[in-house]
């Protein structure tokens, strides 16, 4: 039984077990991740009538997503796993979106996008699902303006585009379970920020006298 | 009640701090700093600090547990900084603390960072008497507090209205071509300088300013005055006497900090002054404070330097005091508050 968390959009927390969603709760507000994360974990455990000792791992969506919120989920997942002495299973949040699509009957090539703010979208391309319905991603998740995406990534123009505004933690959990069952690789421990930190380089000191 | 074993988590600025105390006894104080990553920008970059907290959190926690020789299951409670500080940075500690508290089924206390700087003094082994005035000086804050009771009655007397003192050190260091962080660099450069060489302004110290800002600080005018002085010399083709400028600047900062802190003690009839914050590492500040407190009959308390800079032990120590005072834990609803007032000791 996994506790699953995704904060790449709003805050979503779920409990999954053997391909079943036992609980899923969310707050879609994109500015309150740190406030709600604890209550959502407690609520999902409660809804699933599960205790911490019933959990065998924590599944976490590593993004891409806006940094501040994304980090809240990852920090919580890491700390929870440490406290409960269970492993963390990391997945790419877009892979969870694609997995949900394929589970729901979508076939073939899809382009999954999510809001990156600043009039850009995060996107990932998939050529289809394998025999276990696991999505086959082509390349790393990237960042583009929606209009530029069509031009600069012309080869994906024929892909069915799925603009998601939400990543469900249950999908993250179900994907983690299935990756684990089939011995597939999980995502790397680095969050998929896809943007460098905003910094203004100190360009020497500005003159103060005229 | 037996002394509670408390884990403290601090991520309000650029130090990831995890400390463990048993009541008033320090068991571990581990700090991972992202300072070097900020050096090329000349100041703390909030997003870089927040990213570093996420990376450093687990290893820092693990080494604190090893240092204290305790396991997570042994803990009685967890305390975390909820503010003031950089919100993105605070959120990392808050999220981790909440998840850890749930996984371990331990009570969670969300506490005030500034009051933590005062609370750390309980680890010194000597009982701190109240009331006390506290002067907290770092790169993120410059505040003067009146502490009547650590867990229930803290009042803000004054604070900086522009830059923190530590920031002023960083900015003037850059002006003089010295690296970041500026505090230790200015200190080193000032060693052979004459602190009386240049009379730089003391912010908010004129009678008209004192009416409204008796206990407030301002360092931006001082920084501008130093910049003007340096530019005037460079324009005239003269060599800037870095040692004298550094010493005179430092003297102006130290003078205004100590003068206002002592004025607060005298005005309020409080014969005690406690120092805290990273800028306390500045030897000149400690010396001048000791000298003038001695002359004024004020008892001066300076916690060990490792406990003056931002750290998790101070958060754990304050958490333990709140538990010993019978206060209820914070629950799960709190968030980060970048401007959390000192009156909110426990959120
Ligand atoms: Zn501080």
Image (spheres, coloured by chain):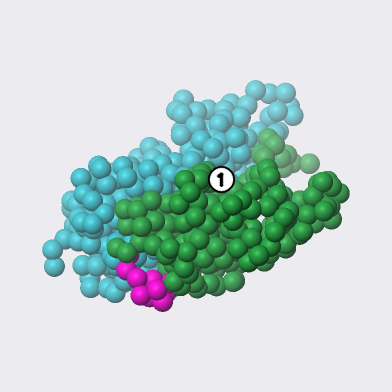
Chain colours: A green, B cyan
Along the viewing direction, whichever of A31 and A201 lies nearer the viewer: A31
Q: Position of residue B38 (x, y in %)?
A: 55, 39
- Quarter of the picture holding the N terminus of chain B: bottom left
Q: Count every numbered label the image shows and give the total.
A: 1
Label 1: few (<14), some or many (≥20) within 10 Å?
many
Residue at 31 percent across and 71 percent down: it is B329
Residue at 44 percent across and 67 percent down: it is A15
Chain designation of label 1: B
Check the image and name the residue furthest to the right: A151
Q: Is residue B321 left or right of residue A5?
A: left
Residue B182 lies, with reference to residue A84, above or below; the image says above
- Quarter of the picture holding the C terminus of chain B: bottom left
Along the viewing direction, whichever of B12 and B280 lies nearer the viewer: B12
Q: Position of residue A163 (x, y in %)?
A: 72, 63
Residue stretch rendered in magenta on the structure = A43-52
Check the image and name the residue furthest to the front: A131
**In magenta segment, residue B30:** no
- Residue B180 appears in the picture as rendered: yes
Q: What element carries label 1?
A: helix
Q: Where is residue B302 in the image (x, y as percent from the top left)?
A: 30, 47
Q: Name the residue under label 1.
A: B48
Residue at 55 percent across and 31 percent down: it is B179
Q: In this view, does A171 lie to the left or right of B318?
A: right
Q: Is residue B24 left or right of residue B288?
A: left
């Amino acid at each position: 039984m996994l506790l699953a968390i995704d904060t790449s959009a709003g805050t979503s927390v779920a409990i999954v077990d053997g391909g079943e969603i036992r609980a899923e709760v969310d707050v879609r507000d994109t500015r309150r991740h740190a406030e709600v994360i604890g209550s959502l974990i407690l609520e999902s455990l409660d809804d699933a009538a599960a205790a911490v000792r019933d959990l065998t791992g924590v599944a976490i969506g590593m993004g891409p997503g806006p940094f501040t919120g994304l980090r809240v989920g990852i920090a919580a997942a890491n700390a929870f796993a440490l406290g409960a002495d269970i492993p963390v299973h990391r997945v790419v949040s877009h892979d969870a979106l694609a997995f949900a699509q394929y589970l729901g009957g979508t076939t073939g090539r899809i382009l999954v996008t999510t809001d990156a703010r600043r009039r850009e979208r995060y996107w990932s391309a998939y050529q289809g699902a394998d025999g276990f319905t696991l999505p086959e991603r082509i390349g790393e998740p990237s960042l583009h303006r929606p209009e530029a995406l069509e031009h600069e990534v012309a080869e994906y123009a024929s892909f069915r585009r799925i603009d998601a505004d939400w990543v469900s933690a249950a999908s993250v959990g179900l994907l983690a379970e299935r990756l684990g069952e089939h011995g597939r690789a999980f995502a790397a421990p680095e969050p998929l920020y896809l943007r460098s930190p905003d910094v203004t380089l100190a360009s020497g000191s500005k003159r103060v006298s005229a | 009640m037996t002394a509670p074993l408390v884990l403290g988590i601090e991520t309000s600025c650029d130090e990831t701090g995890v400390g463990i105390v048993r009541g008033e006894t320090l068991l571990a104080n581990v700090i991972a700093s992202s300072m070097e990553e900020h050096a090329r920008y000349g100041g703390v970059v909030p997003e870089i600090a927040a990213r570093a907290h996420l990376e450093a959190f687990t290893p820092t926690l693990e080494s604190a547990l090893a240092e204290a020789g305790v396991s997570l299951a042994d803990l009685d409670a967890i305390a975390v900084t909820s503010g003031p500080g950089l919100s993105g940075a605070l959120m990392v500690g808050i999220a981790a603390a909440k998840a850890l508290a749930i996984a371990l089924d331990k009570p969670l206390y969300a506490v005030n960072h500034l009051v933590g700087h005062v609370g750390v003094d309980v680890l010194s082994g000597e009982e701190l008497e109240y009331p006390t005035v506290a002067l907290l000086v770092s790169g993120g804050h410059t505040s003067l507090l009146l502490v009547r009771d650590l867990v229930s009655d803290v009042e803000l007397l004054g604070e900086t209205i522009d830059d923190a003192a530590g920031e002023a050190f960083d900015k003037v260091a850059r002006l003089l071509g010295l690296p970041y962080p500026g505090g230790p660099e200015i200190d080193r450069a000032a060693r052979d300088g004459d602190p009386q060489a240049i009379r730089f302004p003391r912010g908010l110290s004129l009678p008209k300013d004192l009416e409204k800002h008796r206990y407030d600080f301002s360092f931006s005018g001082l920084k501008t005055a130093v910049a003007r002085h340096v530019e005037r010399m460079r324009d005239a083709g003269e060599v800037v006497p870095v040692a004298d400028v550094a010493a005179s600047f430092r003297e102006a900062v130290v003078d205004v900090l100590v003068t206002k802190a002592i004025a607060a003690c005298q005005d309020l009839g409080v014969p005690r002054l406690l120092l805290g914050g990273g800028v306390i590492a500045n030897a000149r500040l400690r010396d001048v404070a000791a000298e003038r407190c001695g002359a004024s009959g004020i008892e001066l308390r300076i916690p060990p330097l490792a406990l003056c800079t931002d750290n998790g032990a101070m958060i754990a120590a304050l958490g333990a005091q709140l538990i010993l005072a019978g206060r209820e834990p914070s629950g799960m609803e709190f968030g980060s508050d970048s401007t959390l007032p000192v009156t909110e000791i426990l959120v």
